[in-house]
Amino acid sequence: MKPNDVLYKNPSIPIDIRVNDLLSRMTLKEKIMQINQYTLGTNNIENNKGVEVKQIPAEIGSLIYFPTDPELRNRMQRHAMNDSRLGIPILFGYDCIHGFRTIFPIPLAQACSWNVPLFEKGCRVAAQECRMSGVDWTFSPMIDVSRDPRWGRVAESFGEDPYANATFGSAAVRGYQGRNMSDSLSIAACLKHYVGYGASEAGRDYVYTEISRQSLWDTYLPPFEKCVQAGAATLMSSFNNISGIPSSANHYTLTEVLRKKWGFRGLMVSDWGAVEQLVHQNMARDLKEAGQLALNAGVDMDMMSHAYDTYLETLVDEGKISTSTLDEAVRRTLRVKFQLGLFEHPYTPVSKAEDRFLRPQSVAAARQMAAESMVLLKNEHQVLPLKQGLKILVTGPVADATHDLLGCWWGHGEDGDIEKLNESIQKEFGSQAEVRYIKGCDFDGTDERQFKQVEKLSRWADIVITCVGEKGSWSGENNSHADIALPTIQRHLIQCVKASAKQLVLVLANGRPMIITDEVAMADAVIEMWQPGLYGGSAVAGILSGRINPSGRLAMTFPYSQGQIPIYYGRRHSARPHQGFYKDQTSEPLYPFGYGLSYTTFAYGEPKTASHEVKAGDKFDVIIPITNTGQRDGLETVFWYVSDPYGKITRPAQELKHFEKKLIKKGETVDFVFHVNVNRDFGYVDSEGKRFVEPGDIMIFVGDKKLKFTIK
């Protein structure tokens, strides 16, 4: 029999027919193995270390692949294709979060760029490097709405706003999956963590989340719904317990919402060990029951819990899992493999590292993103950009750092490719300034022996650039911190510099908003560089010199103090707007969502629209002219907010509904347009996800302008 005589091997036949044909030929054991995921290779993610599988069955469905070249993958794939009865290819996944080898800034930083096309391009770079290295599937994007900076995984998010997470998440899906996942440069995306993981109580990882149905629908589900509509191939169930029902056993979210309401047909994989953790969450009495609960709820693939491979056969025999439920999970797994073209092209062509990684266009995109994601938080008396001929001191533990600039989930980035800040600053200014460097102190510890020399050099300098922040390992998974202030020794270094320096510029490298109120007060200028990946050094240097006009705007609020947490812009109105404030300090944040300075200025003109009376179903445009009134070209991000003064369900005081970033040359006026869809942008959802539009007044805010509309 020729291969094409077997339906599932015939590429000219529709995928669903091929899937059903293959499924009909599979034994119970073969089906079960398809919905298990093991690991292959050396794991460089500390929190995911487990016993590496030495004898991997040829029938395994998926493997997390840790090497950087396809040779081991191809050997394993050959085992699956040749040594299994049906020759079903393996799906190889990996946590490619903000780059595979060309490392971009952390996702939270990229959100601060507000440059969605550039972000999508970065995901396309990651897809190309992954696929050419043997990875078919990335566990990204993370679209958890995150409002507590104590939670380390805010570094992986796009911040506190549902619309921002939905928009960047959809761009990631397009970037990773391309127009066709079966091409040689695309991979499957995975939306995580479904759902509400970012609401972890007190910012502690893996813990309980109390989320009402209303909050679930108006805050945490919208990014997932939009990204499912964008065509995401897979989702990942989360660790958290949602109001008493853990995510990985939650039939309402996994099946009633995702499958029935949204019509999602793709693959749902558990997070690492999330099925087993149903036991720790007191939902399941043992691993066997955990597997039963997870699969029946809608978790198709078990990542490293060994519940499915150990117990599913028994559970099917006992009638606790139906064959139709098992078949549907296998069907979803196989469908992704067919969509990726793995049956036609199971092997990855072997290529040289220089042909796969750090391509010129990839490097250019990473450099641009590093520059656009940095946020100028303070610039008193226009200290920046620096003038020529200055004596500059560079100090602080971040100034000579390499690996820590990559941040968490750093993929396969190599320290030797990372631009150091002190070297980049020296290169940027060259003979135009005299630049000296002293480390001053480490990230933490108590060694202050260099402080006297720091004081001496600070007196010598016209300006001191003090580079402080977090180690890359201090944020990310399992990195919850009760104290998110700078370590004591770094605060002492800033105080030491302040006592002697004429002017002080702070450069911050961190994976989360930090408590920096006192440090900001001491500084003349502050640049939030985040953890910028490979090319942060030249971006910071360019901002300092003025070669780059900063354009980043915060995607997450910076608290004034830890006692304010959680603090975010999209809060509902208080019962007493004139009371309820803190008695011992301000109730306002240090820096709000959307904040960021530029070296130029922009003036917002009067918004224009055809009519201020609208009805459900209408679509119309609102246009605002914006003029660059400064002396430099600059990128401006325009945020459009909606506010509903009253309604049958109270809404946040303001809701972001659209944003756009454009270059405006000095003296130029550019129109920005909000294409309003009344149902989408003026409507709201109830606790069952039903969207409604109420008659009455509604406001649009843009910059310092506002428009009032009446919905008839």
Image (spheres, rainbow, N blue to C red):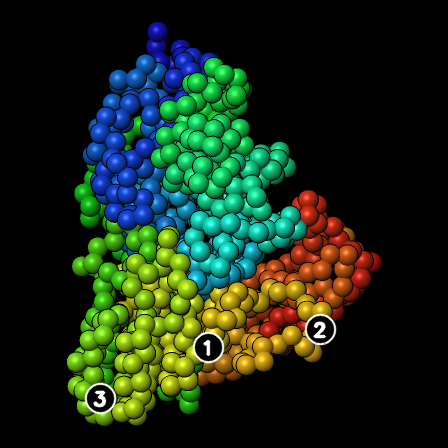
Q: Is residue 600 above or below residue 190?
A: below
Q: Amino acid at mark 1?
A: Leu
Residue at the right extreme of this rendering? 712
- Residue name at image x 51 percent, y 37 percent: 283
Query: Toward the viewer: 631 or 262?
Result: 262
- Residue name at image x 22 percent, y 29 percent: 54
**Where residue 675 appears, x then y in whole percent?**
64, 58
The quadrant of the rendering that contains the C terminus is bottom right
Where residue 576 is drawn, which disc sits there?
A: 2
Q: Secondary structure at mark 2?
A: loop
Q: Residues within 10 Å of mark 3 (few under 14, many from 20)?
A: some
Q: Residues within 10 Å of mark 1 (few under 14, many from 20)?
A: some
Where residue 597 is drawn, which disc sits there?
A: 1
Query: Toward the viewer: 573 or 692?
Result: 573
**Where residue 63 appears, x then y in whole percent?**
32, 33
Mark 2 or mark 1, earlier in chain? 2
Q: Quarter-wise, where is residue 468 in the image? A: bottom left
Query: Toward the viewer: 292 or 403?
Result: 292
Between the residue at mark 2 and the residue at mark 3, the CA separation in whole angstroms equals 50 Å
**Where residue 294 appears, x then y in whole percent?**
49, 32
Q: Secondary structure at mark 3?
A: helix
**Where residue 455 appears, x then y in whole percent?**
22, 88
Horizontal side of 569 relative to 529 (left or right) equals right
Q: Quick check: can you spot residue 414? A: yes
Q: Quarter-wise, where is residue 473 in the image? A: bottom left
Q: Quarter-wise, where is residue 339 in the image? A: top left
Between the residue at mark 2 and the residue at mark 1, the CA separation in whole angstroms equals 33 Å
Q: Amino acid at mark 3?
A: Glu
Q: Which residue is mark 3?
A: 455
